[in-house]
Structures are given as structure tokens and as C-alpha cells.
Image: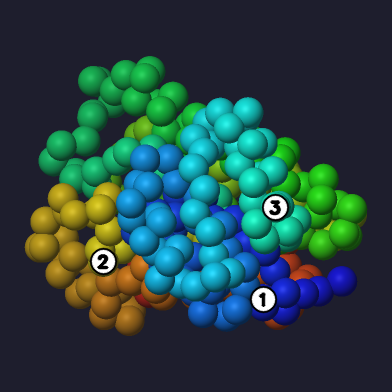
Amino acid sequence: MSKLLNDQAVLVTGAGRGLGAAIATSFAREGAKVVINYRKSQTAAESLATQLGERVVALQADVQDAGSVAEMIKQAETAVGPITTVVHNALAEYSFNGDARSTVEALTADEMLSQHNTAVLGALNVIQATTPSMAEAAFGRIVTIGTNLVQNPVVPYHDYTSAKSALLALTRTTAVELGPKGITVNMVSCGLLRSTDASAATPIEVFDYIAGVTPLRSVTTPKEAADAVLFFASPWARAVTGQNLVVDGGLVFG
């Protein structure tokens, strides 16, 4: 079975701002029903929902809390119907500033757990809450958001990168288990994006350097990354699962 984008009900976690907001906007542009999940960014999320129209709703939940996620899904089903498509984009608060990162000598367990709890356990909570209805419909699309730092840790953001690496593993093991139920699970891995709140602390010289060494001679924008997410949700990707698509202008291959 395959569904057009305008037949889908899409949950985007961490969608009040940044890349998540761009992903929600791209799905709404294609006519999908969209749930904008947020943890703290209520004003931004509700403003975006209003801007995107009546088929879009903003709902609060901390993806680290399974009960909170389950309650959000109940509200979402009332607003837009059963969720067919999940994009797990939620990110624990982070600043991409290489000079301010924790070195491995100073890295703490709390820093590691903060990233893993949101990226990996958050994904698990959302998957567990949404896949029963997907399995019943024999159709589901799950897209996780990773990073090209797994392939090319040019700046050693240990906590963030290890969490995304674990999320890639979960993406692939989940693809194996859920494939027979008609559910695909894939990852879109971005490089540094120009610009989001998380990349706001990145010096302009870093952006310029990346643009200069990237084949497309530009730094990927949130909108460009968001449109790649749509591919995995679209009928064009109906035979694709367990894959990791790197979207960074060709900076990292494979």
C-alpha cells in the first residue's frame, strides 16, 4: 500500500522551530495533515500552526516521557485521525559551537544521557505510541533525523553524535521488525544547517569554510533538508527502508 502525501497525517517532533518547523511546513505545503509537537516552544509552535492552516495543529509533549507521548497521540487522533507518518526530529537543547563543546576528558554522564534520552528513547516512545495504528492500516512511514557527523566527526560532539549513531542503529533494527507490517523506517542525516537556533553559535567562518569544500558550494538550508524527508514519506520511496540519506550538499559520501 502507498499513500500520497496529502492523504497522510504526519507527526513531527520538535517542530516548533528550526528544522522541525521547516519539515512541518513542507508537509503542509503538500496538503498533509500535520501535528507540530513541541516541548517548550508553545508560542512559536502555535503561531506556525495558525500560519499553516486548518489541517495543522500544535500539541505539547516531552518525547522523553512515554505517558506524555501517549496522551499527545490521543489528542492528535482526535484532531487529524490516526498518525500515518512520524518524523522524529526532537533535539535536546544543544549549541553547535566547537570551541564550547565538552571534551572527552570533561564530558559528563548527564550530557550523554540528555542527548540519548531525547534522540533514542524519544524515538522509541513515539514509535511505540504510533505503530499500532500503522500496523492495523498496513501502512506507515517513520523518518528519523541523524547527522553526517557519524560518518565524519570533524568536530567531536561526543554526546550528540553518539546519540545519533544509536538512533541510526534503532532506525535499522526497527525497519527489519516493522517492514512486514507495511511500515518503512529511514533516516535523513543533515550536516550543519544554515541556520537554526542550534547552529546560531557557529562562527560565520565555519559556514564559509563548509560552503567552500562542499561540491555544491553551499551550506544546506532547513528547507532543503526538509524536502528530503518528504521523499521517504512519499510513494516514490515505497520500496526503501532501513536507509540513511546524507543531505549535506555532498560534503560526506555514504
Amino acid type shown at disc 3: Thr
Q: Quadrant of residue 123?
A: top right
Q: Nearer the viewer, residue 178 or 242?
A: 178
In front: label 2 or label 1: 1
The secondary element bearing badge 1 is classed as: helix
Q: Which mark is residue 98?
A: none
Q: Tags 3 and 2 in contact by the CB under 8 Å rule? A: no
The reply to whether residue 45 is in sight is yes
Does 168 sit above or below residue 207?
A: above
Q: Position of residue 143 (x, y in %)?
A: 61, 57
Amino acid type shown at disc 2: Arg
Q: Which mark is residue 78?
A: 3
In front: label 1 or label 3: 3
Residue in the picture at 64% in, 46% down: 75
Q: Position of residue 175 (x, y in %)?
A: 75, 51
The image quadrant where one finds the N terminus is: bottom right
Between discs 2 and 1, the one toward the N terminus: 1
Q: Position of residue 79 (x, y in %)?
A: 65, 57
Between discs 1 and 3, the one toward the N terminus: 1
Does 140 sit above or below residue 157?
A: below
Q: Quadrant of residue 182?
A: bottom right
Q: Quadrant of residue 31?
A: bottom right
Q: Which mark is residue 5?
A: 1
Amino acid type shown at disc 1: Leu
Distance of label 1 from label 3 (alpha carbons): 20 Å
Residue 27 is left or right of residue 221, and the answer is right
Residue in the picture at 13% in, 41% down: 99
Q: Which mark is residue 194?
A: 2
Between discs 3 and 2, the one toward the N terminus: 3
Distance of label 2 from label 1 (alpha carbons): 26 Å
Residue 148 is left or right of residue 194, and the answer is right
The secondary element bearing badge 3 is classed as: helix
